[in-house]
Amino acid sequence: MSVFEQYGPRKVINGCGKMTVLGASAVDKDVADAMAQAAMDYVEIAELLPSAGKFIAQATGAEDGCPTCGAAAGIAISTAAVISGINLDIIENLPDSEGLKNEIILQKGHAVNFGARVTQMMKLGGGKPIEVGTANLVVAQNIENAINEKTAALFYIKSHHAVQKGMVSIETMLDIAHRYKLPLIIDAAAEEDLHKYIKLGADLVIYSGGKALEGPTSGFICGRSELCQACRMQYQGIGRPMKTGKESIIGLLTALDKYAAKKPNAEQQKKRMKLLLAELKNIPGITGSIAQDEAGREIYRARLDIDAKITGISATVIAQKLETGNPAIHTRNYCLSQGQIFIDPRPLLEGQENIIADRFKEILAQAKGNK
């Protein structure tokens, strides 16, 4: 029995991904042990935050860093930082930013909901989101035309949630930002490369600690030193209800330390998913393949195309039955309307791909018997 089952929730098999709604990541023992040690001791948070910032900088190649309780908090805190700087009076009054440079420009196709609205996170930090272009097409002129004396920053969302075509590239956004002497903030929450965007010249980059890093529920901001200092100062303002505890900070830093030594496991991902697909390959109406992540990351998932006319059951109903069972099996369901179910190997614990395959077989056998 899992620790969660003791209090009511069902056991979960996560074939969806590093999703906040499923608890993000299952940390390894070293990270859990470090968090336990931190939980049983004391530290001056005023010393821990800048020390963590230095370690984050070392791990990312940035000038400085700021730990957060998650990437969503990172959006609010980064927004507040570019509005307030280190001015304590402004910090203490945010999100009230009336009369200040508070407009944050982002592309229409990046104004997404990741579980909450990106634009709401900006508003929490005192920002006024300015969405430019249309949901499927933005050009550089749309961005430049929106820049005025109230503009505080440009914002770029690098995510599978965002529109992947018709948007202005990061390089173009950087060029515009730097020509107009504005900071560019990049939300790279689930990205795996911790150096790429700093090397490109981004001023602040936001990451989740519980996604690619496989750390605890946490996050961090890295970038220019004066902006990261302003980020840390937000814990005297809007960052206070978003504060991250000593345990999460130490868990994050431990995960960062271990991440540097990790090797890409794309081949292992493919191997596990090929084994799952082999279990289902002879079932009529099911076509399996390996698919790379839609945002171009080195993530390889199993893709199952369901022909409901042959199986007698749709992809949507299969996913519902998987989720309502015990254990609850969560798959990646963004393309259910197209008859596709994806399974992400990264969050699966050892042997869980076999449980998923067996449950698929049960559901499909029941559907066949009911035809």
Image: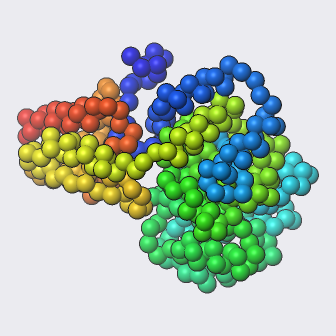
Q: Nearer the viewer, residue 216 or 371?
A: 216
**Residue 265 place in picture, x, y as percent:** 36, 48
**Residue 161 place in picture, x, y as percent:** 47, 58
Q: Is residue 3 above or below residue 298?
A: above
Classify residue 39 as left or right of residue 357. right
Q: Residue at x 30, y 39 (%)?
A: 320
Q: Nearer the viewer, residue 23 or 203?
A: 203
**Residue 219 place in picture, x, y as percent:** 61, 45
Q: Residue at x 35, y 36 (%)?
A: 348
**Residue at the extreme right:** 89
Q: Nearer the viewer, residue 14 or 307?
A: 14
Q: Nearer the viewer, residue 20 or 325?
A: 20
Residue 99 found in image quarter: bottom right
Q: Residue at x 26, y 36 (%)?
A: 353
Labels in figure, total: 0
Residue 37 found in image quarter: top right
Residue 100 found in image quarter: bottom right
Q: Residue at x 38, y 16 (%)?
A: 1
Classify residue 2 as left or right of residue 58. left
**Can residue 111 be seen from the camera position used here?**
no
**Residue 50 place in picture, x, y as percent:** 77, 44
Quadrant the C terminus occupies: top left
Image colouring: rainbow
**Can residue 358 be seen from the camera position used here?**
yes
**Residue at the extreme front:** 261
